[in-house]
Amino acid sequence: PTDLGRANVRSTTWSIHFDLPQSPRGQATLRLAFCGTHGGCNLEVLVNGKLTGETGELPSTSAMQRDGIRAYWVERPISFDAAVLKKGANVIQLHSRANSWAQGVMYDCVRLELNDGKP
């Protein structure tokens, strides 16, 4: 019998690497948009190794089970002090604390916004 990896479920971390020409100031917002979520998944957001927020438990939207007629889109903004970012190399990590093979997310958009307070 095949267990489909159910006994081997592990948390997963996705890493986004990018460079900045200068150190930003003000407020940063990471907009996480999901076209599908399932199983009460929760994502932690780390910026350059520092925990900056989490999504909270995401609803089951039916899209991952291919039930598009009932599926819906979910967005979770994570705001943090832009000083966590630095000139040069940066990394944003999205850490899923899944504990079941049925938990997961399908990303629609990941967008980093900076508001330095200037008009």
Image: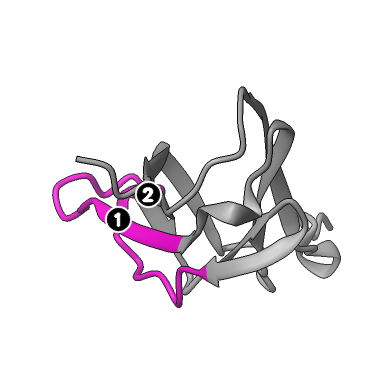
Type of amino acid under label 1 = Glu
Left or right, residue 55 beside residue 76:
right
Q: Residue 37: x percent and y percent?
A: 41, 57
Q: Residue 15: x percent and y percent?
A: 70, 41
Left or right, residue 52 beside residue 117:
right
- Asked where in the image residue 38 lies, by quadrant, the reply is bottom left
The residue identified by callout 2 is 31
The residue identified by callout 1 is 75
Q: Over which residues does the magenta segment extend?
A: 54-79
Figure quadrant of the C terminus: top left
Number of callouts? 2
In the picture, the disc for residue 47 is none
Residue 115 shows in the view: yes
- Asked where in the image residue 6 lies, by quadrant, the reply is bottom right
Residue 37 in the magenta stretch? The answer is no
Dot 1: what SS?
Answer: strand
Residue in the image at 35% along x and 59% along y: 77
Residue 66 in the magenta stretch? The answer is yes
Q: Residue 1: x percent and y percent?
A: 84, 58
Residue 42 shows in the view: no
Residue in the image at 16% along x and 55% along y: 70
Dot 2: what SS?
Answer: strand
Q: Nearer the viewer, residue 103 or 52?
A: 52
Left or right, residue 108 beside residue 4:
left
Type of amino acid under label 2 = Arg
Left or right, residue 41 beside residue 49:
left
Q: Nearer the viewer, residue 70 or 55?
A: 55
Up-down relation of residue 23 to residue 55 (above or below): above
